[in-house]
Image (cartoon, rainbow, N blue to C red):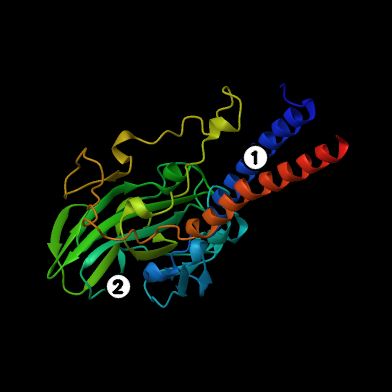
């Protein structure tokens, strides 16, 4: 006995509907999870350098800057920093800079893994090589020859530096290099070969680099201009001033070290909203097509 043509037709339509619902549900899960990343409860300290209290991306609350070192500035108010999260724009618009090295001291009493996020933007210089300085964490040279203009991709763009540290008793491991620890994480913006050191904002979070959202991507001029359009002609920075993240006080070609999480340790930045959506997705995929098939069968029976 051959299948009723109408029966075959509504079975095909039901299958197509199931596929469409599956794709829609998948997009809902992805978009919802991306929007609900919240790092607020992982923050140990965060400061909007040179500026007031501010709420940044991922729920990070930045305190007003109370430092009296150097000079505070809001020269970056004219830029929108399109390569960074919109909610972080206010952080990149203000800064603290000094003609000499300066630092921020952050008391941390608990042992554990942390990530120091340093936020930068170039809002003054118009080419690479004009501002180059170093970053030290508890006297360890963590980043050598940082050129914000070069790292961010130009003026008006953002650049973040992630530095993993592990605190254990009286020692702190900075990118795998051990230093003495006396209860404070010391973030030093160290005078370099050109101009003055600066910082737009910082945050110290519990966890590891692998658990964090990606930092702003470098703006690439070639993606927006023809190949023969050289906007920065003859302004190349010398190789000796390329920023380096290093392990010791001398340049090292090894990558930045990130201490692995202990076995069984909960991911501090795991997206918890996934568990909320999965049951709903299952219901949409299974129940709705079944209802549709039943309705179509009832209509076919009445027609027969």
- Residue located 46% across and 34% down the image: 235
Asked whether, in this view, residue 230 is left or right of residue 50, the answer is right
Q: CA distance from mark 2 to mark 1?
A: 54 Å
Rendered image quadrant of residue 289: top right
- Position in image of residue 36 (x %, y %): 53, 60
- Whether residue 111 is situated above or below residue 294 in the rendered picture: below
Residue 18, disc: 1
Q: Is residue 181 above or below residue 246?
A: below
From this viewpoint, is residue 63 visible?
A: yes
Tag 1, which secondary structure? helix
Which residue, given by chain and number where applicable, does mark 2 sit on? 106
Of 227 and 109, nearer the camera is 109
Q: Secondary structure at mark 2?
A: strand
Q: Is residue 154 above or below residue 112?
A: above
Q: Is residue 303 left or right of residue 119?
A: right
Q: Quadrant of the C terminus?
A: top right
Q: Nearer the viewer, residue 112 or 289?
A: 289
């Amino acid at each position: 006995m051959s299948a009723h043509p109408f029966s075959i037709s509504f079975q095909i339509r039901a299958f197509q509907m199931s596929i469409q619902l599956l794709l829609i549900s998948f997009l809902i899960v992805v978009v919802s999870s991306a929007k609900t990343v919240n790092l607020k409860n992982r923050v140990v300290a965060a400061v909007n350098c040179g500026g007031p209290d501010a709420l940044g991306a991922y729920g990070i609350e930045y305190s007003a800057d109370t430092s009296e070192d150097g000079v505070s500035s809001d020269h970056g108010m004219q830029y929108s920093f399109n390569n960074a999260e919109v909610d972080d724009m206010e952080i990149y618009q203000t800064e603290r800079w000094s003609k000499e090295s300066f630092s921020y001291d952050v008391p941390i009493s608990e042992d554990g893994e942390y990530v120091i996020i340093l936020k930068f933007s170039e809002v003054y210089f118009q080419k690479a090589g004009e501002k180059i300085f170093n970053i030290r964490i508890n006297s360890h040279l963590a980043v050598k020859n940082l050129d914000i203009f070069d790292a961010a991709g130009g003026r008006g763009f953002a650049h973040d530096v992630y530095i993993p540290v592990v605190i254990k008793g009286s020692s702190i491991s900075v990118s795998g290099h051990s230093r003495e620890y006396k209860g404070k994480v010391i973030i030093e913006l160290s005078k370099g070969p050109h101009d003055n050191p600066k910082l737009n904002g910082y945050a110290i979070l519990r966890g590891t680099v692998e658990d964090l959202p990606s930092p702003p991507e470098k703006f690439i001029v070639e993606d927006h201009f023809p190949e023969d359009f050289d906007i920065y002609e003859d302004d190349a920075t010398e190789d000796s001033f390329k920023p380096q993240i290093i392990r010791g006080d001398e340049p090292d070609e090894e990558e930045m070290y990130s201490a692995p999480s202990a076995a069984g340790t909960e991911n501090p930045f795991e997206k918890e909203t996934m568990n909320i959506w999965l049951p709903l997705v299952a219901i949409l995929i299974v129940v709705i097509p079944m209802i549709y098939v039943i309705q179509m069968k009832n209509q076919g029976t009445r027609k027969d």
